[in-house]
Image (cartoon, helix red, strand yellow):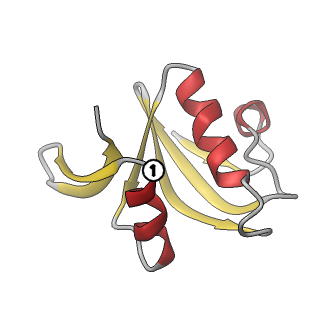
Amino acid sequence: MIIEVDSEFAIKIGFTSDKFEGWLWRDDKRIMFSFICSKNPKQGNLSTLIKTIEGMGLSVAIPTPLGKMVDYLSRRNFVPHISGICNISLYKKST
């Protein structure tokens, strides 16, 4: 299921148009960051979003991160992982 900015669930987790552009995906107990861009980088909005999602008992996955996102994820204990039958390369929180 797609999660668009400012939708009912998006507001619940803090994925709002004043902070982000893009969309997320939800499947079972995981939120995948399909396309996300922070409107105010280095303000803690992404960290807060991830903490809120994890606080709801959901996991976070970021398929094929680029550039600064790879550094951000490695500093926050995310690790490369292969998932599913289609071998999606993504980062997830290490356990």
- Above or below for 83 versus 20: above
Q: State the image coordinates of residue 61 (x, y, percent, origin top left).
A: 40, 46
In the displayed image of the protein, which residue is found farthest to the front? 75
Closer to the camera in the image, 1 or 89: 89
Closer to the camera in the image, 95 or 89: 95
In the displayed image of the protein, which residue is found farthest to the right? 18
Q: Which residue is mark 1?
A: 76
Identify the residue at image location x=37%, y=47%.
77
Identify the residue at image location x=14%, y=54%.
87
Locate the C terminus by quadrant.
top left
Question: Residue 65 is drawn in which quadrant?
Answer: bottom left
Q: State the image coordinates of residue 58 (x, y, percent, origin top left).
A: 48, 26
Identify the residue at image location x=72%, y=54%.
44
In what element is the residue under mark 1?
A: loop
Q: Is residue 30 left or right of residue 35?
A: left
Tag 1: amino acid: Arg
In the displayed image of the protein, which residue is found farthest to the bottom? 67
- Above or below for 83 versus 35: above
